[in-house]
Amino acid sequence: MRGVVKAVVYSAFVVAVLLLLDWLLAEVELLAPLAGYSSYIDAAVILILGYKAVSSIAEAVYLSTLEVSDIGTAGSLRAITRIAGVAVLLSTLTSVFNVNPSAAITIGSFSGLVVGFATQNVLTQAVSGIFLAITRPFRIGDHVIIYNRSAGDPREGIVEDIGIMHTAIRSVDDSTRVLIPNNIVFNAIIIRKGEAEG
């Protein structure tokens, strides 16, 4: 929550600073020579304070995800949030420099592709995890065999955890813990050998 508040404060500060700079450049004679560089000054303010806002939001996403998932997932979502935020900043800069609409659309499209490729694996895992939670092909404590031809040998064990990104199973002899990506589990043949008690 603190990160979101910081992001809102940074965003409001960006707007206030931009308005103040425009007023100062128009009204203060001493700053008149800088009026020709106002778009560059505005861009610098947007980049510096905007990146601070994006970093605050990314940190808030990281901390909130860390409460419900593992550190790897939280780190991935933080990176994705940061990439998406930088893409928004770049699109905003096109309006500061009065770039023609086709260039703005190109930058927006390229940013969308970058974000799409960056989030593809994470979103696949997360959506598969949601569907596993909804369909519930097994529960924690069930003895299962998970076989997916593309993933290689079947995995057998007791379901220990069903997370957003991975399903954890512990081997029957309790010697190994295996994390299987949820998209592999979702597309796998699942054999339930025994159900959890209760």
Image (spheres, rainbow, N blue to C red):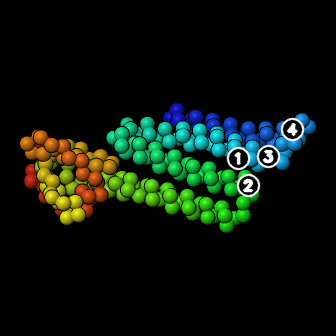
**Mark 4, residue position:** 31
Query: Quadrant of the image for the C terminus?
Result: top left
Query: In percent of the image, x 55 and y 58: which residue is there?
Result: 111
Q: Secondary structure at mark 4?
A: helix
Is residue 175 visible to the viewer in this orientation of the structure? Answer: yes
Mark closer to the chain start, 1 or 3? 3
Q: Which residue is mark 1?
A: 43
Residue at which label 2 appears: 97
Q: Is residue 51 left or right of residue 70?
A: right
Q: Residues within 10 Å of mark 1 (few under 14, many from 20)?
A: many
Residue contact at pointers 2 and 3, CB within 8 angstroms = no
Give the farthest residue toward the bottom: 102
The Cα atoms of the two marked residues, 4 and 2, are separated by 20 Å
Q: In the rendering, at what x and y percent does residue 164 appear?
A: 33, 48
Q: Height in image: 53 above or below 94?
A: above
The answer to which image quadrant residue 10 occupies is top right
Q: Earlier in the sequence, mark 4 or mark 2?
A: 4
**Other residues around mark 3 within 10 Å, as few (<14) / some (14–19) / many (≥20):** some
Does dot 1 land on a helix, a strand or a loop? helix
- Image quarter for residue 134? bottom left
- Say which element carries label 2: loop
Q: Earlier in the sequence, mark 1 or mark 4?
A: 4
State the residue in front, 56 or 140. 56
Q: Amino acid at mark 4?
A: Leu
Tell me how far mark 1 sits from mark 2, CA to CA: 8 Å
Q: Amino acid at mark 1?
A: Ala
Note whether 70 is above or below 95 in the view shown.
above
Residue 172 horizontal/vertical position (percent): 9, 45
157 or 96, nearer to the observer: 96
Give the residue pinned by disc 3.
Answer: 38
Residue 174 in percent (x, y) is at: 11, 40
Query: CA separation, marks 4 and 3?
Result: 10 Å
